[in-house]
Amino acid sequence: MTETVKISTLSGDAQFDGYVARPAEAPKAAIIVIQEIFGVNAGIRRKCDKLAEQGYLAVAPDLFWRLEPGIELDPDVEPEFQQALDLMGRFDQDQGIRDIEATIHHIRREEGVAKVGCVGYCLGGRLAYMTAARTDVDATVGYYGVGIDGLLGEKHAIAHPLMLHIPTEDGFVDKDTQQAMHEGLDDHPKVTLHDYEGLDHGFATEFGKRRAEEAAQLADKRTADFFTAHLA
């Protein structure tokens, strides 16, 4: 079952939408799905639906609600891709983390699900790293997160398991950034990094021309096993 719910901000003075996919039985845990720069579009909703099929309560908060609530963009349509880049440039990431934290609180308080993980893609991959460092989320996965080299100063605060998927030919994450991620995180006891040789940004998208089927299935299998291990 799917629905859109209202989530209160941490300050309680406003609400924003969250897409919710519910499993057929009582959820074994909850997973927040953090959007790309394209909003809570069909691909992000499909990520939620697949997690619900695996037995999780899945929630995708609309993190662009202060800029353009309900925005859905297609990365394969050039004007929409440019619009997404503009939204990312105007997006307050620190505020976005607070909205993710509000979503964690909503799940635990309103849904009664104590164990909460999150998974993010692109911008959401970066926000997933920030969520791992700044909240008490139980387990986190980031796909092709951007600019994580600039966040390595927060790695000491990562207290729960984090997995990052890194395509080696990512057009938005150059080789120096990838090297800095490995140098900064390979020895972190809570962090696991996986490289995907020759692949580009967006390889695990649900729809569209960016998807690389074999690698997407491998990464998603690793993610599923990770959540099984850490959200039990």
Image (tube, rainbow, N blue to C red):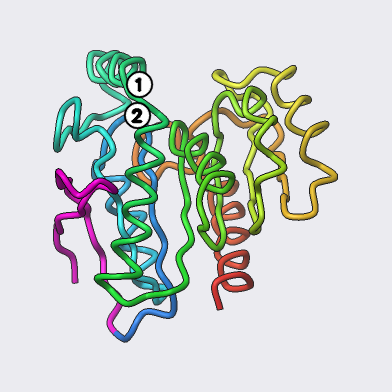
Magenta span covers which residues? 1-24
Query: In the image, is residue 8 part of the stretch drawn in magenta?
Result: yes
Q: Quadrant of the C terminus?
A: bottom right
Front tag of 1 and 2:
1
Which of the marked residues, 1 or 2, is nearer the chain's N terminus? 2
Task: Give me the disc on residue 88.
Answer: 1
Report the residue at 63% width, 72% height from top: 229
Q: Is residue 145 above or below residue 99?
A: above
> Element at badge 1?
helix
- Quick check: marks 1 and 2 in contact, CB under 8 Å? yes
Quick check: 73 left or right of 216?
left
Quick check: 220 left or right of 208?
right
Where in the figure is residue 118, as x and y percent of width and height? Answer: 46, 55
Report the residue at 58% width, 49% height from top: 214
Q: Is residue 71 above or below residue 205?
A: above
Q: Residues within 10 Å of mark 2 (few under 14, many from 20)?
A: many
Report the residue at 54% width, 41% height from top: 143
**Along the viewing direction, whichever of 95 and 26 lies nearer the viewer:** 95
Name the residue carrying label 2.
37
> Element at badge 2?
loop
